[in-house]
Image (cartoon, rainbow, N blue to C red):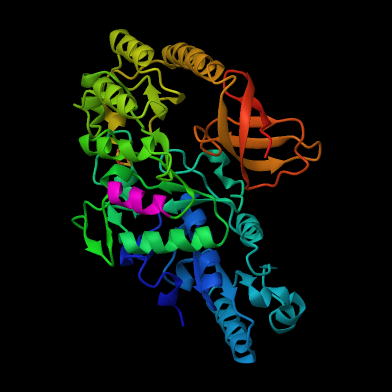
Amino acid sequence: MAENPPNIRPDLAPQARFGEQPRSGQPTLGMVSLGCPKALVDSERILTRLRAEGYAISPDYTGADAVIVNTCGFLDSAKAESLDAIGEALVENGKVIVTGCLGAEPDYIREHHPNILAVTGPHQYEQVLDAVHAAVPPAPDPFIDLLPATGVSLTPRHYSYLKISEGCNHKCKFCIIPDMRGRLVSRPAHAVIREAEKLVDAGVRELLVISQDTSAYGVDIKHAEDRGHRAHITDLARDLGTLGAWIRLHYVYPYPHVRDMIPLMADPTSGVLPYLDIPFQHAHPDLLKRMARPAAASKTLDEIAAWRATCPDITLRSTFIVGYPGETEAEFQTLLDWLDEAQLDRVGCFQYENVDGARSNALPDHVPAEVKQDRWNRFMEKAQAISAQKLAAKVGHTMDVIIDDIDEDGVATCRTKADAPEIDGNLFIDDNTSALQVGEIVSVTVDEASEYDLWGAVNTR
Ligand code: SF4
């Protein structure tokens, strides 16, 4: 067997998901998944995470830098099959990481296959990712990866990324994703829901929906409906919201149909968090056109006002590029004025850089480094002031938080519904945390705020 067996993601992955050409230097892994549905959940989580970290998944052993074998050890025949699969991966590839149920017997495996790189037990997917990082170091590329550079840290079990599509139909001039990852390929909605159900069954309390262009989900498959689920982002968000986890949407573009999702966000019983991560990148219409941004002509301030009218508690996060080729001081000032009016809750900002292969490299009038730095400073100063003011207004309010970590001093690091992991702020609880558990959602009252973080106390339960 020199191919990933189809049962890795039986109906989940259109061929393109496995058939893509890794970009030059992209770390690439193969995977063999044996065993029961629980093992499959782990395989799926590992694959989702690895892809989000920038790894390519090879359809065959020879194209991979290493192979993960997720084993089964339930019956003797399953053990034998697992040992065979490990042996074959060693012959075909040579670098093999073993996980899964048979991984609970590392001595038994090493007796047969002493040359494997690492063995971890069932459901220890964090350790698998550790082993992958050691064997095939990630090569984060901020221009095409979906996770922040810190994303190589491990996803705790209580939240998970859920990738709904791959590729992108746009041609933003600073971006090479369409060249690297191809055009939009959406997963069938029933397959996304199925993966999400299994993640929730496995203990996940928060699902982070990611893709290159979440609002375009399903366009390529004509929003097909199959097994009761329609491949449209509004329907998908509604369906995901019934699973009992927090649903957080990333990388949404301000198309008119985004308005249809806002009532879901305004309904506290829908499960869809009142949180939109929208990469606006700039506010000046001419500059957006020069970037060839999707929805460049949309009146974003009007859209934002309409969203807030429907859902006053909505948290808006965005990223921006300053110093794009040809950006004039007047265009930059438009951006600052826009931010003043938009009052976004969370903001990231990058200084423009050339990326190999991007069409923007050839644009005239590149902005000098010191001007970019100055604009970045001015932009961040304003964004920080807005954030500080918004967080100060939360003091005295009661809200639910999800607990991400409790350290040895008993300080609990949590997130409100307004905070995505790894990119937004935190809410810290300093006292009375002994009864709390990581992954739990608790009610707190906010008692202090800084520019980016909050502090609070647990309400009596
Ligand atoms: S929308 Fe633009 S920036 Fe985003 S992935 Fe597509 S081409 Fe790149």
Q: Which residues are magenta?
A: 233-242
Task: Please give left or right for residue 132 compared with residue 231 in the image.
Answer: right
How far across and down, in percent of the image, does residue 39 sit? 56, 71
Q: Quadrant of residue 457?
A: top right
Q: Is residue 406 above or below residue 73?
A: above
Q: Quadrant of residue 57?
A: bottom left
How far across and down, in percent of the image, does residue 170 sit? 24, 41
Q: Is residue 136 above or below residue 321?
A: below
Chief secondary structure of the magenta portion = helix
Q: Is residue 393 above or below residue 435?
A: above
How far across and down, in percent of the image, does residue 307 sit? 31, 28
Say which residue appears at 46% left-offset and 11% top-offset: 378
Say which residue appears at 61% left-offset and 61% top-offset: 125
Magenta span contains residue 18: no
Task: Please give left or right for residue 416 compared with residue 308 in the image.
Answer: right
Image quarter (top left, top right, bottom left or bottom right) of the C terminus: top right
Q: Report the front residue among 163 and 450.
A: 450
Say which residue appears at 51% left-offset and 14% top-offset: 389
Say which residue appears at 26% left-offset and 29% top-offset: 291
